Amino acid sequence: MTSVRPVTADALYAEIAAAQSEWKLPSVNAGVVRDGSLVWTGSRGKFATADGGAPGPDVQYRIGSITKTLTAMLVMQCRDDGLLALNDAVSKHLPGIAFGDRTVRHLLAHSGGMNAEPEGPWWERNPGVSFDELTAAMDESQAAGPADRRHHYSNLGYALLGEIVARLRGESWLQLVQSRILDPLEMRHTSYFPPGPAAQGFSVHPFSGRLLEEPAHDSGAMAPAGQLWSTIEDLAKYAMFWIDPVHEILSRDTVEEMASPAASDPREKLSASYGLGLRLIADDPQLFIGHTGSMPGFLAGLFVDRTRRVGAVTLGNATYGRVASLPPDLVRILVTHEPFLPQEWVPEPSLTQGDDLLGHWYWGNTPLTISVSAGILTMAGGLTTRLSPLGRDLYQGRDGYLAGETLRVHRDGSRITHLTVATFTLTRNPYGA
């Protein structure tokens, strides 16, 4: 394992030590990743297990709703394989179900207005039920609101997503998680139940400070929303996937789609929103993507900054406390003590097409510049986007206002006369003069 500087390690450890002390955490574990490596781990507290066992990066804890990100990955794999569309109604895949008019996209983004929890006793603290029992109790009268009104977190929606992928693939949700995510990423210590010694979930009494052991049941049909157990070492591998996607699991374009805002609640801070299975936290000018997790007795967090190729993961065994929100703070400490170095500039290779697009352009009298960086054409100015070639003299905007729009190159013989995109005409001089 490569490492951080001693002063950085001290600052990271001080952060988790402060959280453990202030929030009365029986134990807390953390790890920091950078450039494809786990560069630091730290643990604090002496009560990872009921008999006072020590925490560590290889001890399993429940990860709660970080499980949802794996369920979302399975859904996106089905989409990419043509087995479903994100705008499919849920009833297309689960006929006769309540909330059947909601779409797969609604469930992924928690924007369908579904109730947060299933009917019945608190599912996280009681033995789970079958899918048929779960859906028999579903009642649209319990909806939190109409679809597309706002982001409203729904554990129930992810139970439906887990069943959808299982039916489409003809395997259980757990088999799919294992074969399509955990095995390829070599996450050997992530499982439905811990196979050996693992952390004990605790609730800490707010006044006496005594520990109460929390149960860890099989969540049944709700498992896709929060069942899994993992370690800091495995979550570090998972965090590194979100920085450098493995194409056999998900393409980089699909990861970018999941990491784009899909829903938000106007009552919440404008810095936070939700993508497709991922929480998004704006940290100007950067963006953290990942998820938090909680189950009775356990808290977890995983967030990465894909631009700076850094991230952090945390696990704790308390029902309440500052664990899930620690990763962004650990990343900020890392980059403060060891500033991010931009990629070293090297001369650009020759373009296969587009050399004659480079230089200044005007949209009316608004100046624009087309240049190349890392082999990609980039338009900057009044209209800003990266451009991907579609064919001879055709390009598509990759982001910004022109995302998905087609730019056409118009010529008089070999000479470019103007460009057009989204009804705009771009010329070498203001207004084509």
Image (cartoon, rainbow, N blue to C red):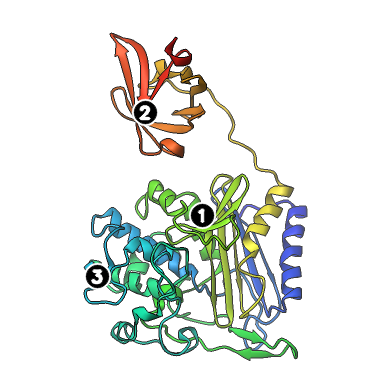
Indicate the amino acid at tag 1: Met
Q: In the depicted view, which residue is nearer to us: 285 or 137? A: 137
- Which of pointers 3 and 2 lies earlier in the amino acid sequence? 3
Residue 380's mark?
A: none
1 or 2: mark nearer the eye: 2
- Residue 43 lies in quadrant: bottom right
Query: From the viewer's perspective, is 270 left or right of 19?
Result: left
Q: Residues within 10 Å of mark 2 (few under 14, many from 20)?
A: some
Q: Report which residue position mark 2 lands on.
A: 421
Q: Secondary structure at mark 1?
A: helix
Q: Secondary structure at mark 3?
A: helix
Q: Is residue 16 left or right of residue 128?
A: right
Q: Residues within 10 Å of mark 3 (few under 14, many from 20)?
A: some
Q: Which residue is mark 1?
A: 240
Q: Which residue sits at x=45%, y=70%?
A: 67
Q: Position of residue 50 (x, y in %)?
A: 63, 88
Residue 38 lies in what quarter of the image? bottom right
Q: Calculate the distance from the C-alpha at mark 1 to the C-alpha at mark 3.
A: 35 Å
Earlier sequence position, callout 1 versus callout 3: 3
Q: Nearer the viewer, mark 1 or mark 3?
A: 3
Q: Quadrant of residue 136?
A: bottom left
Name the residue located 67 percent from the left edge and 77 percent from the top edge. 27
Locate the N terminus by quadrant: bottom right
Task: Provide the residue designation for mark 3.
Answer: 91
- Mark 1 or 2, nearer chain start: 1
Quick check: 283 above or below 345?
below
Seen from the viewer's position, the closer of residues 107 and 429 is 429
> Could you tell me how far apart the alpha carbons at marks 3 and 2 are, in whole angstroms?
39 Å
The x, y position of residue 197, in whole percent, is 54, 82
Q: Are marks 1 and 3 in contact (CB under 8 Å)?
A: no
- Above/below status of 21 relative to 406: below
